[in-house]
Image (tube, helix red, strand yellow):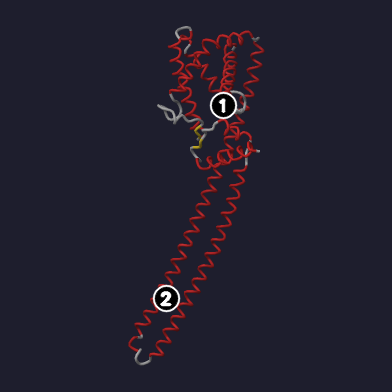
Amino acid sequence: MSVLLQLVLLFYLYSFLGWCCEVAFAASQEKRFVNRGFLNGPVCPIYGFGVLGVLLLLRPLSGGGIVSLFFGSVVVTTLIEWLTGFLLEKIFHARWWDYSEYKWNIGGYICPLFSAIWGVACVVVVKCIAPIAAGGVALLPYWTKASVAALCSAVFMLDLCATIATIRKLSERMRRLTAMANEIHSLSDDIGEKISDTTMAVMSKAAQGEQRIIQAQQATEERIERGRQSVMSRIEQGRESVAGHIDSGRRAVLGRLTQATDANRQRVAELRSKISDLLGEHPFGENRLLRAFPQLTSQKYPDAFRAIREAYETRSRRKRED
């Protein structure tokens, strides 16, 4: 039990040190504090798992040469990073980091550059930090270790649950945005189809009217000589009757079209207002994730997530300007 407690405490210690490294790196890049990491608290679990994996799996190499320890660390940490990225994407349908712009990357999850950085960091930890950390934890009384481990684990689990809840709310918001965007697209197509159908209907009625006039003219050609004025009067009356019929049909069709398009336009306006309200929301946990993972993308709702990201960046830019 004492060994298990020591491993748990070392896990949280290395997770905290990894978080410190991430924060320092982000500060050097963005010139401001960014709470990096999957969780809200000051821990990056991937660092804890990575270092413990190296310490446990490469124990035979810890007292040997640096080269063998380096390459062993590269293999272990690269596998952990790949597995973590793969599982996070499959579970949450999101890509949390992406090395696609780096040479010889594998699926964007891992790349030689960061694998080498992991290897160097683990050599430093194993040779310099691990002995001090293990010795310090071993000096703590049993109940102190048990109490600290229990407290850290409780906070860790609460933080994990809160983060998962935030991700689920974000996913639900993206689902609603996508559904409303699809409905707007469908309504726009419906308006276009109604306009097209109405135009074709009016043109069809006009063509039918012209055909009736031509038929009337052909049917009365033989009578023109016997009663030109009477025939021409009948043709004119026919023209007026057809024109009136076409105009009446056109007004009726356009009236129905106007009612339908007005209803669709009203619905589109309502949906756009709801989309604007959704994009205007900015929960704390969600904003933190967007800051912590600038390369975060959604595999399931890419367009909706892009809109949320753009809204967040616009708010952040305005806040910095103010």
The residue under the point 55% across, 24% down is 25
* Relative image position of residue 83 (x, y in whole percent): 47, 25
Residue sitting at x 48%, y 20% = 117
Residue beneath label 2, please? Answer: 209
Secondary structure under tag 1 reads: helix
Determine whether the residue tagged by mark 2 lies in a helix, strand or loop. Answer: helix
Q: Nearer the viewer, mark 2 or mark 1?
A: 1
**Residue 294 sits in quarter:** top right
Task: Categorize mark 1 by other alpha carbons within 10 Å: few (<14), some (14-19), many (20+).
Answer: some
Give the residue type at disc 1. Answer: Ala
Spot the residue most to the front.
321
Q: Is residue 103 above or below residue 144?
A: below
Is 200 rendered above or below residue 188?
A: below
Q: Are marks 2 and 1 in contact (CB under 8 Å)?
A: no
Q: Say above or below: 273 vs 95.
A: below
Residue under the image location 56 percent in, 64 percent down: 259
Q: Amino acid at mark 2?
A: Gly
**Quadrant of the image occupied by residue 111:** top left
Q: Which residue was labeled with disc 1?
A: 26
- The quadrant holding residue 17 is top right
The front one of 109 and 11 is: 109
Relative side of 227 to 25, left or right = left
Count residues near mark 2 (Cα–Cα under 10 Å), then give few for <14, some for 14-19, many for 20+.
many
Rendered location of residue 270, percent (x, y)? 60, 53
